[in-house]
Image (spheres, coloured by chain):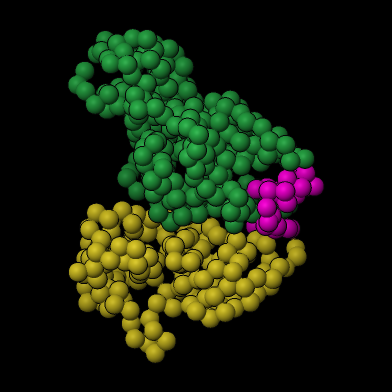
Amino acid sequence: MTTTEYIKPGDLSDLHHLMEEYKGRATVVAGGTNLIPEMRNGEKAPELLIDISDMAALSFIRENNGSIAIGAATTIAEMAASPVLLDNSPILASAAKQLGNPLTRNRATLGGNLANASPCADTAPPLLALDASVEILSPGGKTRQVSLSKFFHGYKFTDLAKGEILTGITFPKPNDSTKGSHTKIGLRNAASICVASIAVALDMEGKTCRKARVAAGSVAPIPMRAYRVEKLLEGKEINAALLEECMAVVKEEISPISDIRGSLEYRSYVTAMILKRNIKRALKQEI
Amino acid sequence: MQKQHMQMRINGEPCEFWVEPNTLLMNLLRNEMELTGTKYGCGTGQCGGCTVLVNGEPVLSCLTLALAVDGADILTIEGVAAPDGTLDPIQEAFLDTAAIQCGYCTPGMVLMAKALLNKNPSPSEDQIREHIKGNLCRCTGYHRIVQAIKSCGE
């Protein structure tokens, strides 16, 4: 492993000055659970590491004014145990609880999981279903927000420009009529890498779906929203026939590949199946 | 590569080091401190052999840069027994239950047990199994390990 320099910024002002000064040369590290193995096998050789794992300003889970904010350096373990998330967004807490294993969860962070931009990022589908936005700190100290659904540009490729850093996410606190459900399919229960996942958040008025958010992981180059499924659900009464239609449409919308963890055919089949189950589970009714 | 200064408490002892930025906590413990109870297994975060407690929380020392835990309190397997050699009740339980086969996973398992029991003095079997999910025992002696941890809580 080669690295020339290592810096821990004290506060946000330090951070954006460093990002500006070392633009393009700096790699941000927090838990290191993705980066260290990549450095060890030679995939990455950062010249400078900026370690944000100790920054109190980036480690928080807050609820205020109807929205929930999570700092980039918040660990996955903190998210899995957070009363705020368990109460307001159990689909996100559920995904956090299933990421890696207890040891990786103690170091891995939300920011790392998203900025790494893997299609199997466990926290991404629930955050997409929650209409989350990413907070970005730009050189010069300016901040900008981008919808998470526009943050992922491609495989391991995000909206972050050189010198920019992801500082956290926010999402509107789901209202009482919003029902959610999340499933991750892995090859085993412990420390599994996602083969396919679905997160749904359905705002219901009686039996009719007012607003639908459906997101999928590990079945496209990026964690994705299933816009056509959402459109199909919105304004309609959810019944068995509509669920069958959703299953057919989601298979068209995703673009899975075959790899060591599963075939294209399996991913397509299981995604449709967990979509149906999650809608049913969210509504807690037999359809 | 410029060495940087850092300090830690390792098993209660204040220690100071000059380390290179890419030095892993595991290598610092094993090579500088000769605390070889911390095991190198996979190097990718899948086996838990390198588990140590950082400020009471179990982490993988093979994925943690030493500089990232500057100022922290580190507990390795060597610091679990009392300085006079009296074993910790968890270590006694592992012996009594014969929860050790080849022993490679044992330091990690004992430290995981310690972290769990500090937070939850009477964990259920499910909670124990959930907690040690990141620690592989390739002798597959999980049953006895779970029994040993459970016996500490009773």
Instruction: Tell me the quarter of the image containing the C terminus of chain B.
Output: bottom left
Q: Position of residue A59 (x, y in %)?
A: 55, 50
Find the magenta span and give its range. Answer: A1-28
Q: Is residue B44 visible?
A: no
How many numbered discs? 0
Residue at horizontal 55 percent and vertical 31 percent from the top: A133
Q: Position of residue B48 (x, y in %)?
A: 42, 60
Q: Is residue A11 magenta?
A: yes
Q: Is residue A7 visible?
A: yes
Q: Is residue A76 magenta?
A: no
Q: State the residue lying farthest toward the front.
A: A65
Q: Is residue A135 above or below residue B21?
A: above
Q: Position of residue A128 (x, y in %)?
A: 48, 28
- Whether residue A102 sits left or right of residue B30 in the image: it is left
Q: Quadrant of residue B148?
A: bottom left
Residue at horizontal 27 percent and vertical 55 percent from the top: B127
Looking at the colours in the rendered structure, which chain would you say is drawn in green? A
Instruction: Tell me the quarter of the image containing the N terminus of chain B.
Output: bottom right
Chain B palette colour: yellow
Q: Quadrant of residue B18?
A: bottom right
- Whether residue A241 sits left or right of residue B2 in the image: it is left
